[in-house]
Image (cartoon, rainbow, N blue to C red):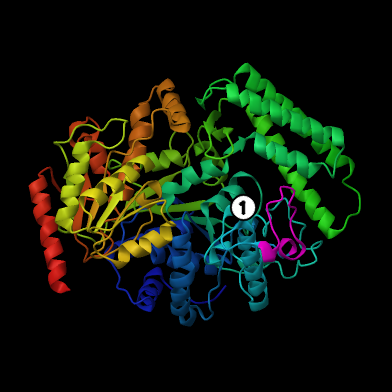
Amino acid sequence: MTEANVSVDKLLAAAVTSVGGSQRAGQVEMAEAVGHAVDAGEHLLVQAGTGTGKSLAYLVPALLHADASNTPVIVATATLALQAQLVDRDLPALADAAEPLLGRRPRWATLKGRANYACLHRVRDGAPDEQGELVAADEASPGSLGADVIRARDWAEEQASTGGSGDRDRLDPGVSDRAWAQVSVDARECLGASRCPYGQECFAEVARARADEADVVVTNHALLAIDALEGVPVLPEHRVVVVDEGHELAARVTSVATADLWPGVVDRTAVRVRSHVDDGDADELRTAGERLRQALAEAPEGRLDALPERLAGAVVDLRDAARAVQSGFAATSREERSADAEAARRAAKTMADDVFGTAERMAANSGSDVIWTEDRERGGRIVRVAPLSVAGLLRERLFGETTVVATSATLELGGSFDAAAGSFGLLGEDAPAWRSLDVGSPFDYGKQAILYVARDLPTPGRDGLRPQAVDALVELMQAAGGRTLGLFSSRRAAVEAAEAVRQRLPDTPVLCQGEDVVATLLREFSADERTCLFGTLSLWQGVDVPGGSCQLVVIDRLPFPRPDEPLSSARQRAVEESGGNGFMTVAANHAALLLAQGSGRLIRRSSDRGVVAVLDPRLVTARYSGYLRASLPPMWFTTDREVVNGALQRLAAADAKDD
């Protein structure tokens, strides 16, 4: 801890200068509010529009708090892009600004789950390959699983020799999950630094050591959830957490708490454990997996309020078989083994533990979980289990244990923070105290953006794109001269739209999600102003393409969850059973959040201009339309397509003149 008495305002001004920017009123207001919250131990929800400079607005008071308290502040994000921005740009600039004021250089670190780092033991001594999926180096064709594994191994060795992080996200181009699994381990498979022959070099251990010495530790929502909810201390001891992209927190925590069972993984587990337990126990596990396969084939697809009798029996049999395998491991737990043998044993036991834990949870079928079946593109039918709500967990184990600042450009829905607060467990009796703040946006949405709703179109059905919507899409794209980001509610709709536009506008390049990795598609989209990009949910958030390449954002329909979507339908019913409005609480909030995120792709800089076009008349005709529109930026509104076409044509002409 330093002796310097540095104010939030003073350090913020220096940091903004360091990044080459200029202070904004909302940024200063947010920084002061965050500073007060962390000092007072008070939870704070902050909505800060794109362009506010919210990263520095929370990093500055976070750093000062860490310096004064001699404890780190945890910053958790939902996306890799924001993590990279914080670590590669904002934190170095903040450190440059803070060093002369604090008398020392602040330290920061990135920390992820162990499976995100290459494991040198697995790289150098190999991974089990019972499935025969890998091939020798001289037989591996480019792009094959074997070739990707070899490339990942070579990269890991290069990282080790050059002092690199070994972080998967630094491997470019990346590799598939299957390939990465051959060069990584999770926490339960890890031998531990003391037993591993490469423990001193371990990328994950080095990252953890750096985090222990840091003022600011940047991590992801998933690792924050594991640390807070599962009682596994994977983060340094801390008192303050900043959750950026806070609108994603509940969904990411739900994902961490979701588990599944399918026959293929049971078969693989039986193969893995055979070398470590009695053959009879391994055989019984495989047999239980086959019973599960047969029961799933007969079970209905979708949410299961109660497990069908045969599926319930198969799950219980699987639980018991996995418990017997666990007992077999326990009987040999004191044996001395080589590092390689111990690694194989831990990997096998981890798989058995996962099967047992998930089967036991499904067999209990508590009212706090939702269970459903679904068909996979590969691997057949699967049964999943997820928590009905994570609000109670977040309230008790995150907001109840630390001071939390949650921020996002879309925390306020329908003019209220209640939806976000409810998802965090901050509503109701005995909920922790919290404050909210909307610092607005530096953009003049009324002058920079038009919200157009196609009131004349028919209401969307469930049978793909309406011909009238395709006509409207083509007309708008012609007026814009390309420059279009199309956000669709389903992959089928995106593909149909791309095919239709390519036929009717052959001179307009149209990219479609799924034709290449998203990063490549975005580069091509931003490089050529005539090019258009169509896609689904992953494009509704996180896409940052300022300037003339994105002057028209088209949304095909209001993004309500499907009525048969298991989790949302179960949550909606639970709200109704407690006397609330399930549709507004679940479906409308879901749609409002995605609409706000999707609309936010348009205006990314103060010089941007354009149109958000919603091809769904319900945004003006339905009883809930006011709530949804109140969740959007305050754009100039019209239902007149001719007005919009004229505006798009003028924008295209102005850009052509500038060129």
Q: Nearer the viewer, residue 361 or 456?
A: 456
Q: Tell me if residue 275 is in the magenta stretch.
A: no
Examine the rendered structure and indicate whether residue 475 appears above or below residue 16: above
Q: Residues within 10 Å of mark 1 (few under 14, many from 20)?
A: few
Quadrant housing the C terminus: bottom left
Q: Looking at the image, which residue is at 43% across and 50% down? A: 246
Quadrant housing the N terminus: bottom right
Q: Amino acid at mark 1?
A: Arg
**Quarter-of-image position of residue 24:** bottom left
Segment tinted magenta in the rendering: 121-139
Q: Nearer the viewer, residue 426 or 265?
A: 265
Q: Nearer the viewer, residue 551 or 439?
A: 551
| Image position of 496 (left or right of 518) | left
Which residue is label 1 attached to? 178
Give SS at disc 1. helix
Q: Tell me if residue 125 is in the magenta stretch.
A: yes
Q: Looking at the image, which residue is at 40% across and 67% down? A: 56
Q: Nearer the viewer, residue 234 or 354?
A: 354
| Image position of 90 (left or right of 450) | right
